[in-house]
Image (cartoon, rainbow, N blue to C red):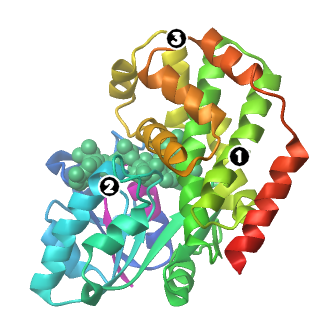
Amino acid sequence: MNISVIGTGSFGTSLSMVLNDNNNRVMMYGRNQDTVQEINERHTNSRYLKDIKLSETITATASLKEAAAHAELLVLAVPVNAMRSVASDLNGYLEELNKQVLVVHVAKGLELNTYKRVSEVLEEVFDEARVSDICVLSGPSHAEEVALKQPTTVSTASLSEEGAEIIQDVFMTDYFRVYVNNDMVGVEIGGALKNIVALAVGALAGYGFGDNPKAAVITRGLHEIARLGTKLGANPLTFLGLAGMGDLIVTATSQHSRNYRCGQMLAGGLTLKEATEQMGMVVEGVNTTKAAYELSEQHDVEMPITKVLYGYLFNGISEDEAFTALMKREKTSESEGLKQLLESQIKNSK
Ligand SMILES: NC(=O)C1=CN([C@@H]2O[C@H](COP(=O)(O)OP(=O)(O)OC[C@H]3O[C@@H](n4cnc5c(N)ncnc54)[C@H](OP(=O)(O)O)[C@@H]3O)[C@@H](O)[C@H]2O)C=CC1
Ligand SMILES: O=C(CO)COP(=O)(O)O
């Protein structure tokens, strides 16, 4: 298949390698002319994936129109905050070229201000005649490990059923295994909200907290994700899968994770601005904490960890205040919470 990968960052580059290994004709689009030239001439992308050699059959362009012209499938691998404008430009070129493509995005976050999932943004931006389906690919998949062909498993979901099955075929290699999931909302919410938990756990690590509080935040964080996700129409069981628990584990326990490392940097005394600038790559959890907190208020969903992280990131509350706020909450029942999730699932599936 002719595939254009939009975004020459960490994940766009490693997914291009997967797709190329699967005998697709891959063209990458990047806005940075130097990166495009490096990929074409040296077959490396040293800013994002050190010591990795790309196949010479992967080409790159700085022309979004050329990428649109090449594509039967568009893989959107830019940060959430760039998705609307990039998709809108692509839609214009598809219109001009009078063609239709399949679209899959891999971004993990919610749009700031609108609180929309990425597929909702894409559905809004692309004209119906220009896209055959809109899909998501998500799960525990650090770009650095995908590029090293470490065995990796992910989920894909789509608006209609066929899209996800095509994505499964196109991406699946002997080291990259793709599962179809019919819960678009759950797959996107799981991928987006695990970044909040990863930031919080990274901060815990940075302050020198032990394994007990980390396990507490990961487990109770997953409950929060499931609570908000279910309210938005997801199946709570999705959060036990690759796009939920799987991605939460890989992100909240790993030095590869930019969200985790950002939390560590904040605990080390950097400001949010300093930490994100120093990272030089997207830290989706920052905007998503804001969006998820505001969404939880709007939907009256209890998300204590998200609320505390929101206070820590944006209102300067200290780690002691954060812990007091979490540990001194009113007594509650774990089994009652699980029961409510199951009841929501029954309600959603009716
Ligand atoms: N890295 C990972 O392990 C994984 C990442 N993801 C998700 O994939 C998405 C992309 O992440 P990742 O590749 O890691 O991010 P990076 O920060 O590594 O790269 C982002 C890329 O997007 C490009 N970009 C940003 N804004 C625009 C724009 N307006 N127009 C065109 N290109 C733009 C950047 O260009 P430039 O280089 O010029 O700045 C860069 O090439 C995120 O939502 C992330 O959560 C999902 C799974 C794994
Ligand atoms: O989503 C990821 C792995 O699945 C990568 O997470 P970070 O964006 O925190 O690096």
What residue is shown at x 63% (from left), y 39% (from top)? 303
Q: Rate crowding at label 3 as few (under 14), some (14 to 19) or many (20 or more) other CA atoms within 10 Å.
A: some
Query: Can residue 326 be seen?
Result: yes
Q: Position of residue 298 (x, y in %)?
A: 49, 48
Query: Can residue 249 be seen?
Result: no
Q: Is residue 252 above or below residue 343?
A: above
Q: Amino acid at mark 1?
A: Leu
Q: Are marks 3 and 1 in contact (CB under 8 Å)?
A: no
- Front-most of residues 116 and 26: 116
* Left or right of residue 49, residue 97 in this image: left
Q: Amino acid at mark 3?
A: Gly
Query: Which residue is denoted by mark 1 in the rendering?
Result: 222
The span from disc 1 to disc 2 (Cα, nearest Å) is 39 Å
Start and end of the magenta stretch? 1-15
Q: Mark 2: which secondary structure?
A: loop
Q: Mark 3: which secondary structure?
A: loop
Q: Is residue 73 above or below residue 274?
A: below
* Left or right of residue 107, residue 300 in this image: right
Q: Mark 1: which secondary structure?
A: helix
Q: Is residue 315 magenta?
A: no
Res 272 quadrant in image = top left
Q: How many marks?
A: 3
Query: Which residue is denoted by mark 3 in the rendering?
Result: 268
Res 306 quadrant in image = top right
Which-is-in-front pick, marks 3 and 2?
3
The span from disc 3 to disc 2 (Cα, nearest Å) is 36 Å
Which-is-in-front pick, marks 1 and 2?
1
Which of the two labelled residues, at mark 3 and mark 2, occupies the earlier sequence position?
A: 2
Which of the two labelled residues, at mark 3 and mark 1, occupies the earlier sequence position?
A: 1
Which of the two labelled residues, at mark 1 and mark 2, occupies the earlier sequence position?
A: 2
Which-is-in-front pick, marks 3 and 1?
1
